[in-house]
Image: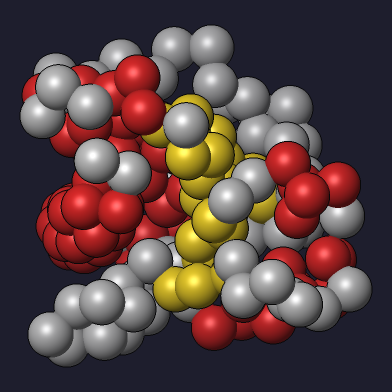
Amino acid sequence: MKKILMVCHGNICRSPMAEFIFRDMAEKRGVGARFYVASAATSTEEIGNPVYPPAKRKLYSLGIDCSGKRARQMTKADYQEYDLLLGMEQWNINNMRRICGGDPDGKIHLLLEHSPNPREIDDPWYTGDFDTACRDIQEGCGQWLDLLSREIK
């Protein structure tokens, strides 16, 4: 089983969307049991808070329930616990490396690293654009799921 941690700044928008979208995609492809997916924040700002309402509404519009999800902060121990840690933007990557004391095993990556157009996922908390964030997250999750599914056959 591959263990994946999705990471953003507050763990109330992008990373929980990525967590639940990846799970949903894996289940729909019949490979859900091959993955354990969670999410976390690099900051302490939102710890304990639920998924931000517009992000929750976006997930519900896709038929995905994220009830019960609460923000938590990433820890150094997560580096050993997870096989892959995916950040939404370079700022997240920098903070993830700081929290983990580096990335000696090459586990930390951008979610859209394998896109034909590699890029960061803008934070919809600031942009208000949950549709674009969701499309970008779906793209990144699909690409990682394709790659990882080939690796664990």
Q: Can residue 145 be seen here?
A: no
Residue 78 placement (x, y as % from top left): 76, 47
Is the image coloured rainbow, by chain, by secondary structure, or in one colour? secondary structure
Does 132 sit above or below residue 56?
below
For the point 21% across and 52% down, the residue is 150
Q: Can residue 68 be seen here?
A: yes
Residue 68 placement (x, y as % from top left): 53, 12
Left or right for 38, reference 128: right
Residue 79 placement (x, y as % from top left): 75, 55
94 or 67, nearer to the observer? 94
How many numbered tags mark residues here?
Answer: 0
Left or right for 105, reference 114: right
For the point 66% across and 34% down, the residue is 71
Q: Quadrant of residue 69?
A: top right
Left or right for 31, reference 14: left
Q: Quadrant of the C terminus?
A: top left
Residue 89 placement (x, y as % from top left): 48, 76
Does 4 sit above or below residue 106?
above
107 or 112, nearer to the observer? 107
Does 107 sit above or below residue 2?
below
Name, please, the residue furthest toward the front. Answer: 153
Q: Quadrant of residue 43?
A: bottom right
For the point 78% across and 49% down, the residue is 80
For the point 14% across and 22% down, the residue is 30
